[in-house]
Image (cartoon, rainbow, N blue to C red):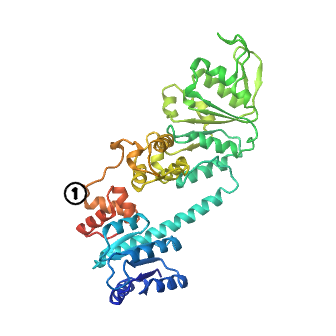
Amino acid sequence: MLKILVIDDNQPICQALQTLFTLQGYQVECAGTPERAWQILAQNNTDLILQDMNFSAGQMHGDQGKALFYQLRQQYPAIPVVLMTAWTQLEMVVELVKAGATDYIAKPWDDQRLLLTVANALKLKQLTEQQRRNEQQRLAAFAGKDLCGLVFASSQMQQLLQMALQLAPSSASVLITGPNGAGKEGIANVLHANSERKHKPFIKVNMGALPADLMEAELFGAEAGAYSGASKTRIGRFEAADGGTVFLDEIGNLPLAGQAKLLRVLQTGEYERLGSSVTRKADIRLISATNADLTHAIAQGQFRQDLYYRINVVQLALPALCERPDDILPLAQFFLSGKKSLSHEASQMLQQYNWPGNVRELQNVCQRALLLSSGAEIQSAELGLPDNSCSAKRSLDDIDRTQLEQALQLAGGVVSRAAKQLGISRQALYRRMEHYGIETP
């Protein structure tokens, strides 16, 4: 049974709240003073605190409640606190909500609104605890593995990395697909760092940056005089990587002639330098990456189907950053390196932006904000994101009953998440729910 602690010096209010919540199946403890509240917290596990802001007759400024709230946040940061008051100034309530209060309720309260607020706070607490357990499991799953500094929090990345670590010890060719800037090279680093070849060379080649007429020489080497300007023998990337791993980024840019040679290397391990008839051998593991649709390129005659099957023994599909929003803030904090923090509005803007440039764009935005921000906290305007790229705040008239119900269902009944999805405040969502007579799913 979930336990609620009510801290209020008004005995009739405590009795009314105890009756209301007991009828809903909660266990309720009441404390008329902060001292009694500390005793109850020390003796029992508490799931939620409902706290008044004044504890002495005639007090209306809320300083007592403010001091107690900060003490509670320091001692019991995992317990959600809902504030209740008839006298506190709105500015103080806003300050405390920003400092971590779950919500506030004005006296006299509406029973349904209060029950809804408490239910949502408890659901959010359960979700937070589940996320903490998932994080502990994630750390345990990757214990002893080299993740090459990758920062992530999403289940999509966790599953992808688990699969990459499972593949790492083999020599199977891996094709990493995903949009530009999503972090395909980081996945390739993990594959090599956890392989049996980790102490051997790891040679990276950006196929999109190589001129087509020099690509074959870059990959397989060239003898002196093999082409104009070749004054000395050139060792190719495959020869340099012997015993290790070759990472071919943007492999879709490899011309057909180079594809034929690559196919031969993968089939036999043999190749010749440009301008030479001497057959050489290379023992390499190939990791490839592309943001192109290679099946479409095959249909257009631009990519060999037999090579596709050789490089695509296993495929790792890396989602775009907008498809794994849980990674956005951890990545942003990593790029800020603790030098500055993000305001609440800036954090929301980062999460609402669609990130067409993926992780690389996020890194650039954070670096620019560090240079341009004048305070210790980065504001939304200092991110420099296009105005039309973030979800604009919506008026209540733009949201109908169906949209509200769908948002609440997708958010698992957690009002704060549904409000974020709709681009409105929690209070605005509550008002619209009351207007339509909607309760949380």
Disc 1 designates what residue?
397
Q: Give how far across and how far down residue 342 sits, in percent.
A: 45, 53
Which corner quadrant of the image does residue 133 belong to? bottom right
Q: Give how far across and how far down residue 201 sits, in percent.
A: 73, 35
- Which residue is at the front of the view, 264 or 52? 52
- Which residue is at the front of the view, 164 or 375? 375
Q: Give how far across and how far down residue 230 sits, in percent.
A: 68, 13
- Which residue is at the front of the view, 22 or 408? 22
Answer with left or right where residue 296 lies relative to residue 404: right
- Which residue is at the front of the view, 92 or 149? 92
> What amino acid is found at the position of numbered circle 1 in the picture?
Asp
Which corner quadrant of the image does residue 382 belong to? top left
The answer to whether residue 298 is above or below residue 413 is: above
Residue 134 visible here? yes
The answer to whether residue 284 is above or below residue 68 is: above
The answer to whether residue 424 is above or below residue 268 is: below
Residue occupying the point 73% across, 28% down: 240
Residue 28 visible here? no
Q: Give how far across and how far down residue 369 sits, in percent.
A: 46, 44
